[in-house]
Image (cartoon, rainbow, N blue to C red):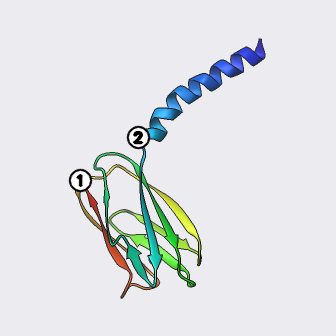
Amino acid sequence: MKAARNSALIALALLFAAPALAQQASVRLTIKDHKFSPAEARAPANQAFTIVVKNLDSTAAEFESKSLRVEKIIAPGGEVSMQIRPLNAGRYRFFDDFHQATTEGELVVE
Ligand SMILES: [Cu+2]
């Protein structure tokens, strides 16, 4: 009886979780030689998405954007994932707060 109820709950959970996962867009960036790649990335407007940044340099980086409202340290060789709220169409600048002079890019939301 209890097992049947649990599996029904699991089925229900999967039913709701699957479309949400399928729809969630993600933007992947890397940092190498203190440059973002791509330096201009694209994301969908009006829906939540994730930004995943991998740091291929041997120094720590701090992914930061005032307009995206994120700030996260990335260890050398490390990767971070950030959940971004639904955004209006526009251009959103981001940068490495530890290497601001060289390491910046823009997210085009459309
Ligand atoms: Cu900072």
What secondary structure is marked by label 1?
Answer: loop
The residue at the far bottom in this view is 101
Question: Dot 2: few (<14), some (14–19), or many (≥20) neighbours within 10 Å?
Answer: few
The answer to the question of whether label 2 and label 1 lie on touching residues, with beta carbons closer than 8 A, is no
Q: Nearer the viewer, residue 88 or 28?
A: 28
Q: Position of residue 80 (x, y in %)?
A: 54, 64
Disc 2 on helix, strand or loop? Answer: helix
Left or right of 76 in this view: 86: left
79 versus 83 height, above or below: below
Q: Position of residue 43 (x, y in %)?
A: 32, 55
The residue at the point 45 percent across, 85 percent down is 33
Disc 2 designates what residue?
23
Indicate left or right for 98 with 59 as reference.
left
Q: What's the amino acid at mark 2?
A: Gln
Residue 88's place in the image compared with 53, above or below, is above
Name the amino acid, label 1: Glu
Q: Where is residue 24 drawn, in percent x and y?
A: 43, 45
Image check: 106 left or right of 58?
left
Reading the image, the residue beneath label 1 is 110
Residue in the image at 43% along x and 80% along y: 97
| The quarter of the displayed image where residue 65 is located | bottom left
* Quadrant location of the N terminus in the rendered image: top right
Q: Residue at x 46, y 76 (%)?
A: 31
Nearer to me, 4 or 35: 35
Q: CA distance from mark 2 to mark 1?
A: 16 Å
Residue found 34% across the figure and 49% down from its top: 86
* Residue 98's disc number: none
